[in-house]
Amino acid sequence: MTLLAIILGTLAAGIGSVWLAAWLSFGIVSRYTQHMLSLAAGALLATAFLHLLPEAFEGGIEPHNLFVTLLVGLLFFFLLDKAELWHHGHEHHHHHHDDGHGAPKAVKKAVKCDMCKGQDGGPACVRACPTGAALRVSPEEFVAFVQQEASRF
């Protein structure tokens, strides 16, 4: 009976948290998804390292099995984080009506910087920077600059 209660509680908490996360991802909190995912991973890692791992060592479980399980958990959250970044890093198309014809026209909105690929003059943020602090240089120019600055010391 206890095992059944544990399984039902785990299913309810798991399904409920997925529904809550889906509901929050469409609301105001959607811009904080990355932060919430990082917080969840950190809380689980802290629990594993500070509470569960020492108890498992005292319980007589093989260290190899413990660390394999820990590695699988770390890889899972790493891949989950990358999947979230991949999903939110692609361009989204928003439909706007054309002035004269009324037909929808797809307009690209950059969600992740692509250096304004395809635009003349380079990245728009560099062109629009009022102080000139933003600039885009090639890797070779950057290395030359760093070596020049390092030689001054």
Image: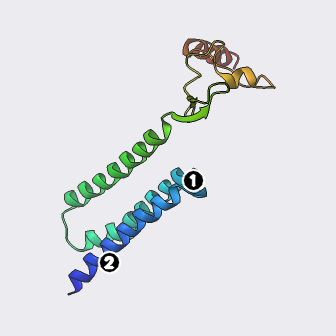
Q: Amino acid at mark 2?
A: Gly
User: In the rendered view, does 116 fall on the left or right side of 23?
Assistant: right
Residue 67 percent coordinates (x, y):
26, 56
SS for dot 1: helix
88 is higher (above) or lower (below) than 62: above
Residue drawn at x 26%, y 73% is: 58
Residue 102 percent coordinates (x, y):
61, 30
- The crowding category of the residue bearing disc 1, from other C-alpha atoms within 10 Å (few below 14, some 14 to 19, many at least 20), is few
Foreground of the two, 43 or 53: 43
Foreground of the two, 132 or 120: 120
Quadrant where the image shows the N terminus: bottom left
User: In the rendered view, does 23 fall on the left or right side of 97?
Assistant: left
Q: Amino acid at mark 1?
A: Tyr
Mark sitting earlier along the chain (1/2): 2
SS for dot 2: helix
54 is higher (above) or lower (below) than 127: below
Foreground of the two, 120 or 136: 120
Residue drawn at x 23%, y 85% is: 2
Q: CA distance from mark 1 to mark 2?
A: 27 Å
Which residue is denoted by mark 2 in the rendering? 9
Label placed on residue 20:
none
Residue drawn at x 50%, y 58% is: 39
60 is higher (above) or lower (below) than 153: below
Residue 149 percent coordinates (x, y):
68, 18
- The crowding category of the residue bearing disc 2, from other C-alpha atoms within 10 Å (few below 14, some 14 to 19, many at least 20), is few
Which residue is denoted by mark 1 in the rendering? 32
Residue 100 percent coordinates (x, y):
66, 24
